[in-house]
Amino acid sequence: MASPERAVDGRAPQLFMPSRQSALKFFFVCMSRGALRKAVRACVGMVIRHFFFAQYKGALLKNVPVVNVGHPLDEEIPFLPHKAGVYLDFVAFWIRAASFLDCACAKRSEAADFIVSIGLLYKTAAEVYAVCFSTTDRPRRVGRLRFALIHAFDPHLMCVPSLHVMLAIRTYTAFAGVVRARGEGELYAPQAEELRRGALAIVESTLYVKQHSVNCVAAAMYAMTRFDPPLFAEEEAEAFVTDLFTDNTLPPSVAARMREHVLSLYRRFLAEGELSANWTEPLLAFLEERKK
């Protein structure tokens, strides 16, 4: 994987990190290369069809039921407007990871495959959204441009499963999967850890800016286990939850109860999913419960 100019003495240079990639620059790289351009077209097409078009159509026609998926524990999580930047970074986050893969991998197809998989997440989550929309309580008026953008472009009807959480998890697990498959997991361990920490921060931000509930996090984790079991197995999911909210922003007791609830609900979905004909059944059953 590592090219001579990227590796020194068998180690990946610490400065060569995903966070140093330019999402904008990589977009132009994609437009200049056939395989990447094709992958971007496929990804964008799925995002428009299964997220923007489906959500705005549902909001306009009101032809899909909507349920609130909030949990009392959400009220104990403080509203932190300054986390909006982290929340909004989720697209640039996975694009930077794709750029890194493109630079570091001998097989350029690995970056293209990753980009297509991002679009497939939207298509997968839409299997739930097509049956039932979900929302949470969020501040209606916030005097910040970033929140104006969030509220303007997001009707807030697709919370279970959370695509923010799914995309964050996919980014770090897909990268780790690529480097492991090439036998260079140790070489790129710093980069993999940076992406994992970035994913944790994005997941936390969804709760801090009141765009999602702890229930949405558990549902998204379950969706990712079913989407790619080898990359996000139950053991990895448990380790991921263990590292959420460990920076003392939340009172330790609140953080502990949050992690306990997310993990418990995730395990419930997983157990129910093993007995279901379709992966969506546990989530749709949960949404049906919320209608009552």
Image: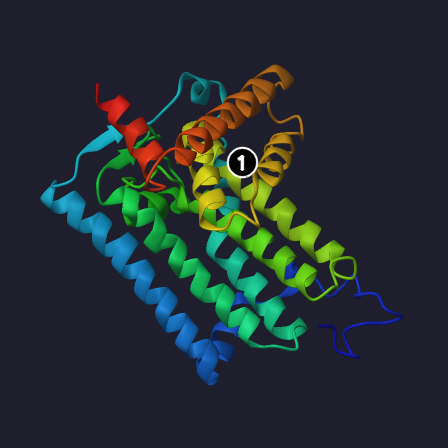
Image quadrant where residue 131 sits: top left
Image quadrant where one finds the N terminus: bottom right
Determine whether, in the image, residue 104 is placed left or right of residue 267: right
Q: Position of residue 156 (x, y in %)?
A: 29, 40
**Residue designated by label 1:** 204
What residue is drawn where x is 64% and y is 18%? Answer: 252
The type of residue carrying mark 1 is Glu
Determine whether, in the image, residue 118 is placed left or right of residue 49: right
**Callout 1: 10 Å neighbours few (<14), some, many (20+)?**
many
What residue is drawn where x is 50% and y is 23%? Answer: 264
Q: Residue furthest right?
A: 9
What residue is drawn where x is 63% and y is 62%? Answer: 178
Residue 274 higher or lower than 117, as above or below: above
Determine whether, in the image, residue 232 is placed left or right of residue 291: right
Image quadrant where one finds the C terminus: top left
Instruction: Tally the marks.
Output: 1
Q: Is residue 79 visible?
A: no
Q: Position of residue 269 (x, y in %)?
A: 42, 31
Give 161 or 76, whichever is nearer the viewer.
161
Give 239 or 140, whichever is nearer the viewer.
239
What residue is drawn where x is 59% and y is 73%? Answer: 102
Q: Is residue 53 visible?
A: yes
Instruction: Give the structural element (helix, strand or loop) at label 1.
Output: helix
Q: Position of residue 256 (x, y in %)?
A: 60, 20
